[in-house]
Amino acid sequence: MARLPSAERRRQLTEAAIRAMARDGVPRTTTRSIAAEAGVSLSVFHYCFDSKQQLVESVITTITGHYVTVVKEAIRPRATLEETVRAGFQAYWDHVRTHPDEHMLTYELTQYALRSPGFEHLARRQYELYAETYTELIDQLRESMGLRLRVPVPVLARYLAAMTDGLTLNYLVLGDDAAWTGILDTVTAHVAGLVQEN
């Protein structure tokens, strides 16, 4: 087995944990099954992660990073604010549709953390991360397009986090791809109404 830097090994184990948890469920995923998924010994796992809490936090952060990277690339100034905002939502939505297992896992991780003594702070951290992510995206747009908001940044960030969280769960439960073009258009128009260009 090739020796990898510890950060790279943690990344490898985190991605293996995401695959195993998405396939088997969070409660049934063990450190042994994650190590097997990654093709490493159990001792390597314990060298990289001190606890399951540390692993769960890494999984949450990594899944969020998967779609944030896509959205950041999509949100670049376009002809209108609506087109820019719509491109960001579309990029997120395309990720949901192509990686439903990862998004379903985020809800399972929340429930797992809330129901497991000593893990509750990870659910809070998960939703704080969502708000921080939207704050970063909002600031990116404000700087690149010279925008002024009709609401404070923290309010808009938490609103966007709550809205996309609800829409994502709704899609995972109901599916219906055909309905989402209209829904995303409506969301885009609403969000653009909370922003004004200088």
Image: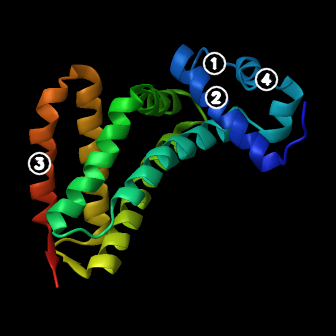
- Residue highlighted by disc 2: 17
Q: Amino acid at mark 4?
A: Gly
- Quarter of the image with the N terminus is top right
Please report whichever mark, 2 or 4, sits nearer to the chain's N-terminal start.
Answer: 2
Q: CA distance from mark 1 to mark 2?
A: 8 Å
Please report whichever mark, 3 or 1, sits nearer to the chain's N-terminal start.
Answer: 1
Residue 129 on image: x %, y %: 47, 53
- Residue highlighted by disc 3: 185
Marks 1 and 2 close (CB-CB < 8 Å): yes
Q: Amino acid at mark 2?
A: Ala
Q: Residue at x 34, y 79 (%)?
A: 143
Residue 62 on image: x %, y %: 56, 44
Q: Is residue 123 left or right of residue 74?
A: right
Q: Do we see residue 3 in this rendering?
A: yes
Please report whichever mark, 4 or 3, sits nearer to the chain's N-terminal start.
Answer: 4
Q: Between tags 4 and 1, which lies in front? A: 4
Dot 2 alpha-carbon crowd within 10 angstroms: few under 14, some 14 to 19, many 20 or more: many
